[in-house]
């Protein structure tokens, strides 16, 4: 072969290699994933919420080259428990309750986040949203999403001044207890909010952290206030109604009910979310003072089950204000915009209207926020509470004494169950 031909052949070979390289680079994400590794994430978001969260993860991949294997499931507790038991947990899981977070931390399944998340980033959340097993212990999770619970939804065309009279009539409440294996939790929300508004955050915290007996008269009063509100027909309907459907009939010319006591997330399930307005629950729930400023809240807490460089990088991304602003922007409908505990996220990123901004402002600025009590309790206690709420609603004419004594026996037994810990604080 002549020198000229060899030169031309070499040139063609080099050009061919460059074309292959350009094609690989052009594929973009695939080469980045291979070069930077991957991270697995488990969370409960599916549907519209899952699509928005996946969009956020895709942005992370494009920026870092780290592939994210996301699994969204409504059976998160069962899936995670199975994976942990088999020794194959996800790198990161977003837990729907602080109590479950505490249990996995006590079992040494979680990586402390103090060395992963810079202190300035944790400060933007405050202690309420960064649970610990003890007051001075390490942080095991951070709330990447938050919701407000001490609220009552109604049709925006109603006069706010008419709400107290409607609230006094148990037939005007839209109530649904159904949620498959977790049925009953809307009832625990009622009882928790009643105790918080009737007795204040100090008593609420003592009870939610396992220090106040279920048989205490103040706890019993909250149960009785809830039971006294509903007649047999309302209670029966509540027991056979899925919580997602309960408030969908709030609106229209002749709605069968006028009020729904439910968290801020429920607005996204209404037929026309723009029709919904809310009022704070104090003064509308039985025997509560409308001057109360205490608010019940809930959070979804990201935690690391496997400590890898990729998991650390994604954790830092998920809890950042920039990522959460992008998360809000990626949500297709303003009704389902997520709310955040991070004070660095602007109100406009959490809602396109006055209702969304008011919820976001309450989560950011309220001086007396308390985590959902049953979410903070050990799993066995939480499940028993949910079942007791269903049992009580099935016969509200019967005093709750027997149910409360059963719950108290469980509380006492959990003192000797180290893998079912109570949080040290739920209010802040």
Image: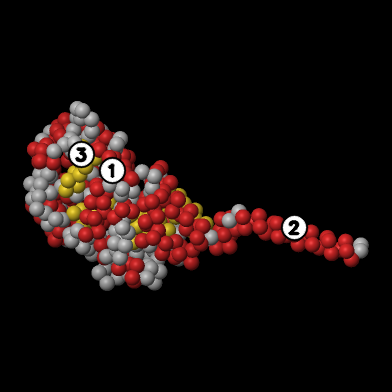
Q: Are marks 3 and 2 in contact (CB under 8 Å)?
A: no
The one of 46 and 205 positioned closer to us in this rendering: 46
**Secondary structure type for disc 2:** helix
Q: Pointer 1 and pointer 3: residues touching (CB < 8 Å)?
A: no
Q: Which picture quadrant has residue 173?
A: top left
Q: Is residue 285 visible?
A: yes
Left or right, 79 with reference to 209: right
Q: SS at mark 3?
A: loop
Q: Around disc 2, counting alpha carbons within 10 Å, would you say few (fewer than 14), some (14 to 19), or many (20 or more)?
A: few
Q: Quadrant of the C terminus?
A: bottom left
Residue, x 83% and y 61% (percent of image)?
A: 8
Residue on which disc 3 sits: 156
Mark 1 residue element: helix
Instruction: Name the residue at 20% across, 39% down.
Output: 156
Residue 266 numbered tag: 1
- Alpha-carbon neighbours of circle 1 within 10 Å: few (<14), some, or many (≥20)? many
- Residue placed farthest to the top in the image? 254
| Above or below: residue 227 compared with residue 55 | above
Relative height, residue 344 to residue 249 (above, below): below
Pinpoint residue 263: horizontal percent, then vertical percent. 25, 47
Foreground: disc 2 or disc 1: 2
According to the image, label 2 marks what residue? 16
Q: Earlier in the sequence, mark 3 or mark 2?
A: 2
In the image, residue 142 lies at what x, y percent?
Answer: 34, 61
Quadrant occupied by the N terminus: bottom right
- Depth check, front residue: 304 or 281: 281
Q: Position of residue 11 (x, y in %)?
A: 79, 62
Which badge, 1 or 3, is on the more N-terminal residue? 3
**In front of the other: 158 or 219:** 158
Image-based side of 32 in relation to 113, left or right: right
């Amino acid at each position: 072969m002549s020198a000229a031909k060899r030169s031309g052949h070499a040139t063609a070979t080099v050009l061919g290699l460059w074309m292959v390289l350009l094609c690989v680079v052009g594929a973009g994400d695939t080469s980045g994933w291979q070069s930077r590794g991957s991270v697995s994430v488990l969370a409960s978001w599916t549907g519209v919420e899952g699509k928005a969260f996946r969009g956020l993860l895709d942005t992370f991949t494009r920026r870092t080259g780290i592939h994210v294997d996301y699994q969204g499931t409504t059976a998160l507790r069962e899936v995670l428990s199975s994976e942990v038991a088999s020794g194959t947990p996800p790198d990161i899981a977003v837990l729907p309750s602080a109590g479950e977070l505490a249990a996995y931390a006590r079992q040494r399944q979680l990586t402390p986040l103090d060395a992963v998340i810079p202190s300035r980033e944790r400060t933007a959340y405050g202690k309420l949203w960064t649970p610990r097993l003890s007051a001075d212990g390490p942080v095991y999770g951070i709330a990447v999403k938050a919701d407000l619970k001490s609220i009552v939804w109604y049709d925006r065309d109603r006069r706010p001044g008419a709400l107290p009279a409607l609230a006094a009539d148990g037939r005007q409440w839209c109530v649904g207890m159904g949620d498959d294996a977790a049925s009953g939790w809307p009832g625990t929300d009622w009882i928790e909010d009643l105790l918080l508004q009737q007795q204040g955050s100090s008593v609420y915290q003592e009870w939610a952290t396992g220090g106040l007996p279920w048989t205490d008269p103040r706890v019993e009063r909250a149960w009785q206030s809830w039971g006294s509100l509903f007649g047999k027909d309302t209670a029966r309907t509540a027991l056979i109604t899925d919580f997602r459907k309960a408030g969908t009939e709030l609106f229209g010319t002749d709605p069968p009910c006028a009020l729904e006591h439910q968290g801020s997330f429920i607005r996204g399930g209404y037929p026309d979310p723009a029709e919904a307005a809310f009022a704070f629950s104090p003064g509308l729930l039985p025997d509560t003072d409308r001057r109360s400023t205490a608010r019940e809240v809930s959070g979804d807490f990201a935690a690391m089950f496997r400590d890898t460089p990729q998991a650390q990088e994604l954790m830092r991304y998920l809890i950042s204000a920039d990522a959460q602003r992008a998360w809000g922007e990626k949500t297709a409908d303003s009704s389902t915009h997520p709310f955040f505990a991070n004070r660095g996220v602007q109100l406009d990123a959490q809602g396109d209207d006055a209702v969304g901004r008011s919820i976001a402002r309450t989560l950011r600025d309220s001086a007396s926020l308390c985590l959902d009590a049953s979410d903070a309790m050990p799993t066995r206690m939480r499940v028993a509470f949910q079942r007791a709420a269903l049992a009580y609603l099935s016969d509200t004419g019967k005093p709750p004494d027997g149910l409360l004594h059963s719950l108290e026996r469980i509380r006492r037994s959990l003192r000797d169950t180290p893998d079912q810990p109570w949080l040290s604080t739920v209010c802040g």
